[in-house]
Amino acid sequence: MRPGTRTVNIPQVTYNNKNRIIKVCAGIGDNIWLLQKLLNTHEKFNFSITGDVPQRGKQIFDLCPMVVADSKYDFDFTSDDVINKSYTYNSWTHYKHHTFFLSMNTHLEEGNRIEEFIPDLETTFYPQYNTISEKPIADHLLKDSNKKYVGIYTSGYSVLRHWNFWREYEWFKVIQYLFSKNSDYVFVLLGAEYDLDINANLLKLLDAYKIPYVNTVGQLRLGTVVEVMKRLHYFLSFPSGLGILATTLKTPTLMFYPPHLEKMINTWAHPADIYNLNYKGMLFCEPEEALTWIETKYRLFDR
């Protein structure tokens, strides 16, 4: 879902076993969608992940040993190669190749439901990620049982230049209003190292107005993020794999989308989550519009 750039070339990736190789895009969300299908092949694969940056996709494979034999970055192809060369058979029985590209991005971007991608494979909407060892860290970070933790993912300036969404002041406006309605909220800032810049400025605002927060940006393994997300009362997300990940954990999520991805909004979440508003996809908007939906439609402050 994000623009990527090709990096320097390195020797061809090799594996130590005979599992089939699937070449995939770089994003966490891109690959969650595939794993939700491939979990039902009863086969383990080697995943070759494009070396496009930022490199974030491998972490999700590390949490899914039930379908992943191995996963490595490969700089010999790009995400565009994956999308353009992906096989689009309507039955898993036709995927007989030892090595092949696979992407669901175009399928979803055109407005098609996830169940319709390789439709003879079931869709596992709520995968069981291997994160048990990360529970103590999440328990320590979110240790006050009297608080309600609200997750925030803002992304960073480098991505915002492409997507043109909220900066720190808009995010702060949302957080400030939520806190004014419930002083038991504690805001959990999530993200990777490349998200540090906008969050650094947001933290200054939170400190100035004495709004409580837990800052985890650039500090956690994805497995720990999974366990943190399980403990969230609500999650607001810039369009990214984190919003997709949270929804697969049944964490109530509001995820924003740019206009060119409008058709994708309701293509991948469980229909029940869409119906009961535990997942909401919303086009980029002003903070006031998002807050109105949160308060009057989802009724967050009554939960």
Image (cartoon, rainbow, N blue to C red):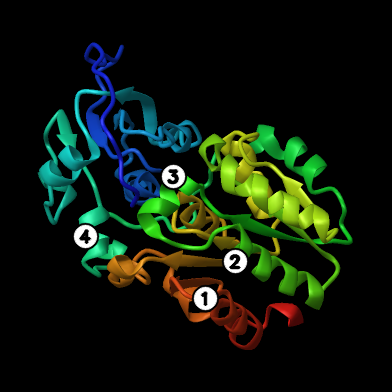
The answer to whether mark 3 and mark 2 are in CB contact below 8 A is: no
Residue 87 position within the rendered picture, expressed as x and y whole percent measured from the top left: 12, 45
Q: How many angstroms separate mark 3 from mark 4 (CA)?
A: 27 Å
Which element is circle 4 on?
helix
In primary-sequence order, the first of circles 3 and 2 is 3
Label 1 packing within 10 angstroms: few (<14), some (14-19), many (20+): few
Regarding residue 120, the answer to whether it shows in the image is no
Pointer 3: what residue?
158
Which element is circle 1 on?
loop
Pointer 2: what residue?
170
User: What is the three-letter code of the residue carrying label 4?
Assistant: His
In primary-sequence order, the first of circles 1 and 4 is 4
Q: How many angstroms separate mark 1 from mark 3 (CA)?
A: 20 Å
From what the image shows, is residue 276 above or below residue 71?
below
Residue at 69 percent across and 78 percent down: it is 300
The answer to whether mark 1 and mark 3 are in CB contact below 8 A is: no
In primary-sequence order, the first of circles 4 and 2 is 4
Label 2 packing within 10 angstroms: few (<14), some (14-19), many (20+): some
Which element is circle 3 on?
helix
User: What is the three-letter code of the residue carrying label 2?
Assistant: Glu
Residue at 12 percent across and 45 percent down: it is 84
Pointer 1: what residue?
286
